[in-house]
Amino acid sequence: MPPTTPLGGTAGASTGRLGDRVFSGLSLAAGVLILVTLAGVALFLTREAWPALLADPSELPGEQSLLSYVRPLVYGTLVAALLALLIATPLAIGIALFISHYAPRRAAQGLGYLVDLLAAIPSVIYGLWGIFWLAPKLVGAYRWLSDNLGFLPFFGDPTATGRTMMTVGIVLAVMILPIMSAVYREIFLQTPRLHEEAALALGATRWEMIRMTVFPYARSGLVSGAMLGLGRALGETLAVALVLSAGGGITLNLIAQSNPNTIAANIAQQFPESSGLDVNVLIATGLVLFVITLAVNMTARYLVGRRSEFSGAN
């Protein structure tokens, strides 16, 4: 009689191939579902925004063109997000390096949990913290900046309340800090141990070892973490709506009393009282935010793709 072992092995391989096909099909379905969802969102926003795109300027809020209405909102959105990114990126890198390469293992584990816990705090809590505690504390600092650096356009006449674009940038930086630091921490920990030990064996200090081995290896991951934080800051709504004293146009002054609003915060504030064409205008601004976010993600993928060939992972 023929041996039974090959038959059993063939059956196992067939079962394995069936499992692979099922898993591959589920993965493909999940990817297609994401694309279909994005396409559905884009079609909905385009359809609902179309009346505002074709409307006469006299019918729009403030009797101005849609471009004039959206321009300060886009400016405020980008400024707030970029400020948050500029503040959070060096802090996230420093926190991730301390946890991954400097702190004792037991302390690093506890610090990692504490930093990750910041991501679980609701946006409204950050907004309340920003408006009731942080903003009043920063009034004196804004006056100092105006007195000593007032020749710069970023620090003109200061506000008396502290509810400025700079305050919003700080609040958003704290909000995106746990996401970015978690990404950076995991990337730094993936650096090959042999690379680090080789650098130390050649006489490099710990900082020189990090600069020569960790940073080149994590270069693409640093870009990915920064873009992830930027995308999070672009779409933040409630915290910005609570903290920012909005109502002004485009200005370079980051500590002014009146500031341009962000797209997400403006939608949240105006939508309950809007009707008819005003709703279409708000949805049109949402379409603009959708395009900006999509462009940020596509740019991030492009940069990561270009940097990956220089990564130590390859």
Image (cartoon, helix red, strand yellow):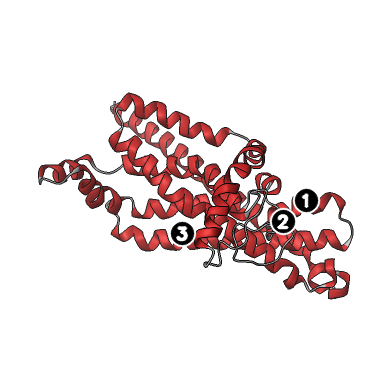
Are the residues tagged 2 and 1 within 8 Å (C-beta)?
yes
Give the Cα separation between the discs numbered 2 and 3: 33 Å
Q: Dividing the image into 4 quarters, which one contains the C terminus? A: bottom left
Write down the residue under mark 2: 246
First in residue order: circle 3 vs circle 1: 1
Query: Residue 135 appears at what percent x and percent y?
Result: 62, 44
Residue drawn 19% across and 45% down?
195
Closer to viewer: mark 2 or mark 3:
2
Write down the residue under mark 1: 269
Give the Cα separation between the discs numbered 2 and 1: 11 Å
Query: Residue 130 appears at what percent x and percent y?
Result: 62, 41
Write down the residue under mark 3: 301
Quick check: 104 left or right of 81?
Answer: left
- Can residue 85 be seen by looking at this rendering? yes
Query: Residue 49 appears at what percent x and percent y?
Result: 78, 64
Q: Dividing the image into 4 quarters, which one contains the N terminus? A: top left
Give the Cα separation between the discs numbered 3 and 1: 33 Å
- Can residue 26 be seen by looking at this rendering? no
